[in-house]
């Protein structure tokens, strides 16, 4: 007798399993966009202004530093000449040690150090502003550009403020001592302190590169 053919059981099939229809999940309530949140919109606008001011101040610092180095080199040359004259002619009067062209350069250098002081004060003010922004609701829960939240910008400004302040002290020390050096070694030491910054250094340049990358700013 020939048996009726039958389908072999599939090991993946089970008699007690029934088809299941997956219902579409309940749509989630969309998160309120940043642009429609009044608080986020306010602090983002303020943050953009702070960042813009920070970048402008960095440019001012670099320009002042470059011009200051040129003045330091000139003052060093003038001072070297006055010291040689004082030694050869045994003339140590103020008119010899502090000629008019030296005083003129010193006054210009003083103005540049004033620029550094302004930058220091500005970034301290920016730190206070961003600390105020951190008190706003949701201020630190949003990614504002690519990956940074408000805390990252605050940390950046605090580090920047500390570095500016320490470098300003060095620049001020050079201003106060360079015109009064009475040996070549002291002149070289002062000029070198200006020429090779200890705090506004390559690491700070890298910090600004990270900032520009976060803002998606391409260097021209």
Image: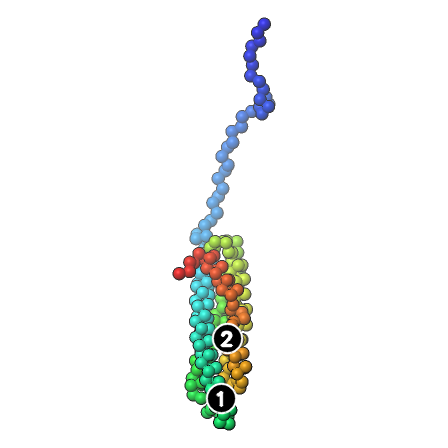
Q: Distance between the residues labelled 1 and 2?
A: 24 Å
Tell me the tag on residue 84. 1
Tell me the tag on residue 37. none
- Residue at x-position 50% and y-position 88%: 83
Give the answer, above or below, for where 35 lies relative to 203: above
Q: Which of marks 1 and 2 is nearer the N terminus?
A: 1
- Residue at x-position 46% and y-position 76%: 69
Instruction: Measuring from the top left, give residue 21's x and y in whole percent.
Output: 51, 29
Q: Which of 82 and 29 is in front in this view?
A: 82
Residue lying at the far front in this picture: please name it: 88
* Image quadrant in which the N terminus is located: top right
- Residue at x-position 50% and y-position 71%: 120
Q: Nearer the viewer, residue 66 or 27?
A: 66
Residue 132 in view: no
| Circle nearer the viewer, 1 or 2 | 1
Give the answer, above or below, for where 108 lies relative to 91: above
Tell me the residue that label 2 is attached to.
194
- Residue at x-position 46% and y-position 92%: 95
Residue 2 in view: yes
Instruction: Measuring from the top left, give residue 85's x and y in whole percent.
Output: 48, 90
């Amino acid at each position: 007798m020939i048996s009726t053919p039958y389908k072999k059981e599939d090991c993946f099939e089970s008699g007690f399993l029934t088809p299941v229809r997956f219902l579409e999940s309940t749509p989630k309530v969309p998160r309120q966009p940043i642009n429609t949140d009044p608080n986020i919109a306010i602090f983002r606008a303020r943050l953009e202004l702070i960042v813009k001011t920070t970048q402008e101040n960095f440019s001012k610092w670099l320009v002042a530093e470059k011009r200051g180095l040129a003045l330091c080199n000139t003052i060093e040359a003038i001072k070297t000449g006055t010291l040689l004259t004082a030694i050869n002619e045994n003339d140590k009067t103020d008119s010899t040690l502090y000629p008019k062209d030296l005083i003129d350069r010193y006054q210009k250098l003083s103005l540049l150090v004033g620029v550094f002081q302004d930058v220091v004060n500005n970034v301290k003010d920016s730190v206070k502003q961003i600390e105020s922004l951190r008190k706003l609701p949701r201020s630190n829960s949003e990614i504002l550009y690519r990956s940074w939240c408000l805390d990252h910008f605050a940390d950046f400004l605090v580090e920047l403020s500390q570095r500016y302040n320490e470098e300003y002290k060095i620049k001020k020390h050079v201003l106060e001592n360079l015109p009064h050096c009475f040996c070549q070694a002291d002149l070289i030491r002062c000029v070198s302190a200006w020429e090779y910054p200890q705090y506004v250094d390559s690491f700070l340049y890298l910090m600004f590169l990270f900032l520009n990358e976060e803002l998606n700013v391409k260097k021209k």
